[in-house]
Image (cartoon, rainbow, N blue to C red):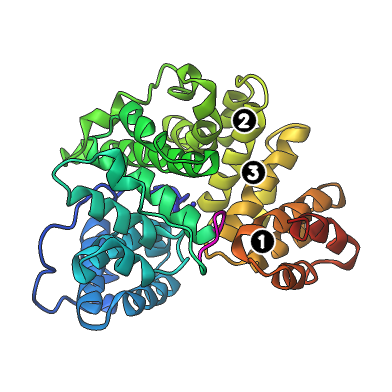
Amino acid sequence: MMRGQWGARILVVLLGMVWVGVLQAGEPAPPETCRPQPFEAKMECYQQHLETVLRSEGTESALTALEQITTQDPEALREAHPLVHHIGQGSFAHYGTAPLALSHCRDVFWSGCYHGVLQAFLSSLSHVEPQHILPLCPISETVSAYSFQRYNCLHGLGHGLTIQFRYDVLKSLAFCDALPGSWDRESCYGGVFMENIVTFQQAQRAQPAGGHHHHEATSFLNPQDLLYPCSVLTEKYLRACYLMQTSAVLTFLNYDFAQAFTQCARVEGEHQTTCYRSLGRDISGYTLRDAARVNELCRLGQGDQIQQCFIGAVKDFILTDANPDPGLALCRSLDGPFKKDCYATVGEMVVPLYDDKDKRAQACRKGEDEYVEACLAVATAF
């Protein structure tokens, strides 16, 4: 997910902004004119270009335009998830309903288009009650209960609730609790914790320049306890919380990855593993999915910490664009002792990506021959 999303400025610039009213008129500069500008002005320029494409050609074309921009500009790639959130917010304004806007999104850049649509929808309501959120992510003939598409909807709902409730994490989690199934609730929790951290990072970046930021978000992170709020929440929230927490830890530690491993070691019980996997995801994004750098940084851990870090990284390699091939490439680059679990993780991740078992098997068979069975055993078990 962050993106990209997990880069040196993990989701720090554009999230939390609400698309207000009709897309502005006018013809912004083309992307090649945006590129030489200072960072903040450049991102605003890209936003304006994407708005114009969306207004004239629709969400699909805006997503394609962002893909083209990110191939030319590494800074835009680091900020791709916030930018694609912005496309999602604009899509809701453009199409007028959440279901219609969601139908035009694609699983690119950590699926931020879906998240932005849900943010904008909830922000359009004068108040939110549980009955407003229950119908938002339905199961259908084309969307299965545990599909990646439905996960993105539920995760985006968590983002939207957090913004709607002015970063009151506890209230947002309570609304997620209104969802009917444990997997639904867990998916929503993740969006809440991500949005909390994202907005904190946005505030940290804005402070030196005196920019606008949300003070409310900072009360749910604590530089004196880098594991807060996970360290005080009840058990049902902990997995989702620790799966995001290293993004906050790294922000406080100025991306000292060795110290981040030490912080994860403070976590008690099974969620310590979750923390190491969260760190692997962050390392993936920080390096822009550079397999050699991921190998280097994950090995700052010790023993099983390294294995769990690689598992978190391979998941991010796959989820960035909902494509197992980058994950398979990472597995190929690992030393023998780490390969089997890596390929098994690929098998785990193709389950929500593909309802068709044959497609899952086809993905696994792209791996190294001696590890195909490790992937297939998980991919075809459901």
- Residue at point 48% right, 31% down? 249
Q: Is residue 145 magenta?
A: yes
What mark, if any, has residue 350 been given in the picture? Answer: 1
Where 100 sits versus 297, above or below?
Answer: below
Q: Secondary structure at mark 1?
A: helix
- Please identify the quarter of the rendering in which residue 67 is found: bottom left
Q: Position of residue 102 (x, y in %)?
A: 35, 65
Q: Is residue 124 magenta?
A: no
Q: Position of residue 325 (x, y in %)?
A: 66, 68
Q: Secondary structure at mark 3?
A: helix
| Of callouts 2 and 1, the N-terminal one | 2
| Of callouts 1 and 3, the N-terminal one | 3
Magenta stretch mostly in which secondary structure? loop
Q: Position of residue 79 (x, y in %)?
A: 37, 57
Kindly report the distance in space between the C-alpha atoms of the residues bearing marks 2 and 3: 10 Å
Pick out the residue farthest to the right: 370
- Residue at point 70% right, 59% down? 330
Query: What's under tag 2, amino acid-wise?
Result: Phe
The residue that mark 2 highlights is: 261
Q: Position of residue 311 (x, y in %)?
A: 69, 47
Q: Nearer the viewer, residue 340 or 36?
A: 340
Q: Nearer the viewer, residue 158 or 346?
A: 158
Query: What's under tag 3, amino acid-wise?
Result: Leu
- Residue at point 42% right, 33% down? 177
Query: What's under tag 1, amino acid-wise?
Result: Val
The residue that mark 3 highlights is: 297
Task: Report the magenta residues as a range.
Answer: 143-147
